[in-house]
Image (cartoon, helix red, strand yellow):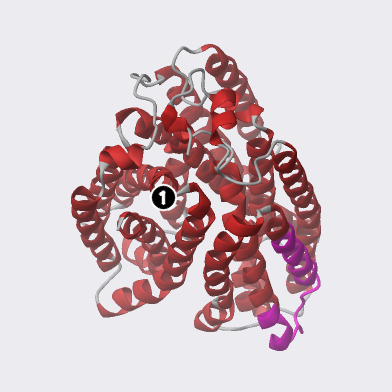
């Protein structure tokens, strides 16, 4: 029952965001926005989520996971209400920022609740089912959102999200048990780390703004260079502060657990390898191969469906057989598909594109749930909230980074060949210079990502070796992990 309750929140965050992506052209038409400005309807929420994930994880460990989860659902409902009634872009963006705050609260607490209420021997199964819910939301969003937009208007997508959010908050109030969902969270940590919250939020906001605007302003722009320098300064200050703070937002000793550190490294590199696929493939299928948006959506559907189904199975299997082999197999399959994407061109047949999408989704499902299980299972239960927040932050930051870098490379190749970066010139003549430049840039992106995939596999090997050496192949050995990351061991830290 607890999983079903939390699944409603996870599903709502995903389907709401993916549904808005379908509604974006209608929003742009009604509010008279160009494409660059309209994209901020998506960026505003992603930026907010990344900026506040860590503070929300810390807050959940202090104030209570049930409270933060219910509050997150209500904040999401408030945000979509503002968006649904917005008459202009500033009001719409304000609603998206509010929704992002709520989504961050839900996302970070959901994983902590799931890993707390399930026994350690079933952690992988639970996280695999969670991946299935996320995949289902990713598949359903465009379908449900498109139907609502066609029958009613783009505002209906926000209304539907708000109704589900309110229903989910009521369900959580009735079902969730505060004592059980906390499962060992430290009562002694009684205050928030405001300097850490401000520094991490400001630093991540500056970094993501730089990544999303570098291609538009130029990577040599004083604003972009200054942003990266500012991020580096804030990061250094944040690490120094967190190492000395009496009640830090994230206890840096958590990274002394090598299984956690290696799993996090593999997660970032894996999502970095994964990110450009969902960004570049729709452009490739529509602009280069001349397919419609609905056809492109159908061609890409096997990816999230396969990922969701395999994620459930991989999570269960990793409970029984360990996480390393599944991570290696999944990342290895994705290395193969990335290499295949790097040879796609204007004449690539559908008989090659569809199997590649299927295998890519299979590989994603095979490594993602075991990776999260390896990371969460490496730390004490009292750190589940902040660990879950950090893992979601790693995923979101890797995706944003991959998108920004991929866009910069493709646009840079097109500009260097004198065809500009206007995608309209690609669709007008896919076999011409602009189409060739786009394909060449796409090839470069995917070939660079092969290196990220290889490094992700190395991280999986190291996490698995360390786990076996220290007796952490089973998630049950929590007592030693608690000693590494918590100054005081309590019985709640052990399974």
Q: Is residue 23 above or below residue 376?
A: below
Q: Residue at x 63, y 41 (%)?
A: 264
Disc tally is 1
- Side (left or right) of 492 relative to 294: left
Main SS, magenta residues: helix
For the N terminus, the quadrant is: bottom left
395 in magenta: no
Q: In this orientation, which residue lies closer to the viewer: 123 or 332? A: 123
The answer to whether 264 is drawn above or below residue 188 in the figure is below
Res 418 visible:
no
Q: Secondary structure at mark 1?
A: helix
Q: Is residue 329 magenta?
A: yes
Residue for point 63% across, 83% down: 290
Q: Which residue is mark 1?
A: 114
Circle 1 packing at 10 Å, graded few (<14), some (14-19), many (20+), is many
Q: Pinpoint residue 386: horizontal percent, then vertical percent.
A: 47, 34
Q: Position of residue 375 (x, y in %)?
A: 59, 43
Query: In which quadrant of the rendered view does residue 335 lie?
Result: bottom right
Magenta region: which residues? 328-355
Residue at x-position 54% and y-position 47%: 396
Q: Position of residue 157 (x, y in %)?
A: 30, 66
Which residue is more in the foreground, 387 or 408? 387
Please state if 29 lies on the left or on the right of 290 as rendered.
Answer: left
Does any portion of residue 72 appear in the rendered image? yes
Give the quarter of the image for residue 465.
top right
Residue at the spot x=76%, y=62% of the render? 332
């Amino acid at each position: 029952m607890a999983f079903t309750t939390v699944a409603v929140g996870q599903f709502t965050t995903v389907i709401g965001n993916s549904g808005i992506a379908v509604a974006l052209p209608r929003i742009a038409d009604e509010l008279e926005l160009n494409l660059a400005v309209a994209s901020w309807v998506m960026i505003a929420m992603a930026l907010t989520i990344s900026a506040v994930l860590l503070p929300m994880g810390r807050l959940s460990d202090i104030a209570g996971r049930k409270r933060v989860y219910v509050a997150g659902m209500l904040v999401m409902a408030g945000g979509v209400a503002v968006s649904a009634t917005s008459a202009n872009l500033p009001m719409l963006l304000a609603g998206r920022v509010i929704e992002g705050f709520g989504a961050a609260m839900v996302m970070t607490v959901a994983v902590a609740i799931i890993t707390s209420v399930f026994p350690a021997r079933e952690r992988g199964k639970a996280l695999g089912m969670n991946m299935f819910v996320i995949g289902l939301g990713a598949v359903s969003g465009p379908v449900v959102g498109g139907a609502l937009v066609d029958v009613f208007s783009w505002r209906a997508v926000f209304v539907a999200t708000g109704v589900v959010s309110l229903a989910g908050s009521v369900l959580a109030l009735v079902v969730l048990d505060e004592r059980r969902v906390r499962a060992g969270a430290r009562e002694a940590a009684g205050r928030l780390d405001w300097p850490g919250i401000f520094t991490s939020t400001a630093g991540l906001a500056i970094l993501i703004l730089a990544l999303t605007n570098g291609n538009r302003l130029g990577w040599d722009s004083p604003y972009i260079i200054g942003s990266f320098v500012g991020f580096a300064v804030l990061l250094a200050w944040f690490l120094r502060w967190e190492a000395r703070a009496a009640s830090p937002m994230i206890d840096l000793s958590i990274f002394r657990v090598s299984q956690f550190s290696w799993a996090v490294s593999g997660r970032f590199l894996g999502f970095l390898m994964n990110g450009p696929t969902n960004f570049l493939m729709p452009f490739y299928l529509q602009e280069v191969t001349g397919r419609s948006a609905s056809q492109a959506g159908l061609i890409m559907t096997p990816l999230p469906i396969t990922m969701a189904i395999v994620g459930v199975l991989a999570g269960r299997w990793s409970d029984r057989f360990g996480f390393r082999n599944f991570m290696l197999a999944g990342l290895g399959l994705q290395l193969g598909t990335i290499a295949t994407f790097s040879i796609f061109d204007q004449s690539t047949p559908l008989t090659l594109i569809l199997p590649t999408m299927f295998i890519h989704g299979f590989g994603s499902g095979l490594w993602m749930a075991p990776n999260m299980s390896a990371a969460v299972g490496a730390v004490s239960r009292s750190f589940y909230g902040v660990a879950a927040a950090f893992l979601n932050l790693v995923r979101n930051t890797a995706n944003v980074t991959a998108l920004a870098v991929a866009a910069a490379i493709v646009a840079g190749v097109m500009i260097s060949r004198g065809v500009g970066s206007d995608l309209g010139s690609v669709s007008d003549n896919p076999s011409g210079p602009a189409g060739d430049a786009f394909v060449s840039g796409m090839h470069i992106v995917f070939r660079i990502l092969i290196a990220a995939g290889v490094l992700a596999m190395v991280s999986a090997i190291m996490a698995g070796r360390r786990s076996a050496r220290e007796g952490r192949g089973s998630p049950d050995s929590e007592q030693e992990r608690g000693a590494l990351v918590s100054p005081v061991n309590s019985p709640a830290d052990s399974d």
